[in-house]
Image (spheres, helix red, strand yellow):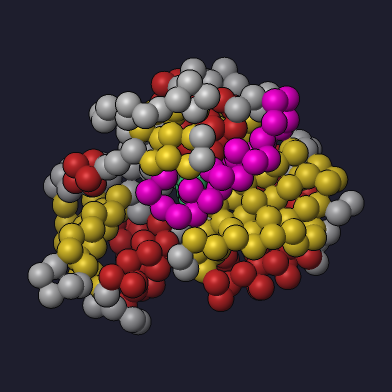
């Protein structure tokens, strides 16, 4: 049986996104934020025991995390009480247990997304920047990959915008479960191919748009394979980056045949758009 842990760490409000990004990259299953009377923020991070060990190592240099065991799934779902609807241009992400807002227009794309224990409720800047790119780049008939799909929100948005080939992959079992469930709820289960395939296993397929909201180190290590699965003139949307990580990641992609087109910012987070050159 899976052993769950809760990591508790108190951080300055300015460090919340940084800490969340660091531990989401490790594959934690839920983060609950609790403002404290002194202005600091307590983060309770739910994860499996093996991930808890890595998270403690990552955080311990700069913060003072503690870990405690959690009975069954208790505590991993507390964030649901604070979930909200997110609008990103014409895309509206609604947690299925909340009402669809009354101002939704017929032209809006409303998606019911329950991330379960995966990342991708749209509460994070990186997801929202990727969804903006979905609106701009995904046209009917195109082929889209979502590498590190989490809840499947990007793949599902792409499918609902008319992409006819959509591949969603992740290494986390929780992400596969959430993406399959969400694809079903949003009527695109027959379109979205969900799997734990590694990027190397996809190499014979070519995509018009490749999304990878996955963190700097993983992106750099996958650069060649991500470029390889992108069609010539196709676009790579690389996210999960902090400002200081952008140039290193761009360099790894430039070395493998991609050209920088744009760097977008939301708070301290960055999304890089690149084009495969050949
Ligand atoms: C920040 S979340 C992004 C989720 C979603 N695409 C979004 O934009 O909200 C990153 C996801 O990448 C997955 N991941 C981490 N390393 C991976 C790898 N090497 N291959 C595939 N997925 C990976 C994690 O399990 C996690 O679900």
Q: Residue at x 45, y 55 (%)?
A: 125
Question: In this orientation, which residue lies closer to the viewer: 121 or 128?
Answer: 128
x, y percent for residue 84:
29, 41
Question: What are the residue bounds of the magenta stretch?
Answer: 122-151
**Residue at x 70% of width, y 50% of height:** 236
Q: Is residue 136 above or below residue 140?
A: below
Identify which residue, 243 or 204, lies in the foreground: 243
Residue 223 percent across, percent down from the top left: 70, 59
Name, please, the residue furthest toward the bottom: 61
Q: Note whether residue 73 is visible.
A: no
Q: Residue furthest left?
A: 37
Give the residue at the far right of this rendering. 278
Q: On the image, which quarter does residue 256 sit in?
A: bottom right
Q: Is residue 254 left or right of residue 239?
A: right
Up the image or down, 38 lies above or below 104; here it is below
Does the segment drawn in magenta span residue 132? Answer: yes
Write down the quadrant of residue 122 in the picture.
Answer: top left
**Residue 40 coordinates in the image, percent (x, y):** 20, 72
User: Where 122 sits versus 60, above or below?
Assistant: above
Q: Is residue 18 left or right of residue 81?
A: right
Residue drawn at point x = 34 percent, y = 38 percent: 85
Q: Quadrant of the N terminus?
A: top left
Residue 140 image offset from top left, x and y in percent = 70, 25
Q: Can residue 39 be seen from the camera position used here?
A: yes
């Amino acid at each position: 049986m899976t052993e769950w842990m809760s990591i508790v760490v108190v951080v300055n409000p300015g460090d919340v996104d940084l800490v969340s990004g660091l531990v989401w990259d490790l594959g934690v299953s839920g983060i609950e934020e609790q403002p404290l009377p002194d202005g600091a923020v307590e983060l309770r991070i739910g994860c499996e025991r093996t991930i808890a060990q890595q998270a403690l190592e990552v955080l311990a240099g700069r913060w003072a995390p503690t870990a405690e065991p959690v009975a069954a799934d208790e505590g991993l779902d507390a964030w649901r009480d604070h979930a909200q609807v997110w609008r990103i241009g014409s895309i509206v992400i609604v947690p299925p247990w909340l009402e669809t807002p009354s101002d939704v227009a017929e032209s809006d794309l409303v998606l019911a997304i329950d991330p379960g224990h995966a990342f991708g409720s749209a509460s994070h800047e990186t997801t929202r920047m990727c969804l903006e790119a979905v609106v701009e780049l995904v046209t009917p008939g195109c082929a889209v990959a979502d590498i590190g799909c989490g809840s499947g929100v990007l793949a599902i948005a792409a499918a609902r915008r008319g992409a006819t080939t959509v591949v969603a992959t992740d290494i986390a079992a929780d992400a596969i479960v959430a993406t399959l469930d969400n694809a079903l709820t949003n009527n695109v289960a027959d379109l979205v191919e969900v799997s734990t395939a590694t990027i190397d296993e996809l190499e014979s397929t070519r995509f018009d748009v490749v999304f990878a909201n996955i963190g700097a180190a993983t992106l750099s290590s996958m650069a060649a394979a991500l470029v390889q699965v992108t069609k010539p003139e196709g676009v790579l949307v690389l996210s999960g980056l902090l400002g200081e990580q952008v140039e290193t990641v761009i360099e790894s992609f430039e070395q493998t045949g991609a050209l920088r087109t744009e760097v977008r910012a939301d708070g301290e987070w960055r999304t890089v758009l690149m084009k495969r050159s050949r």
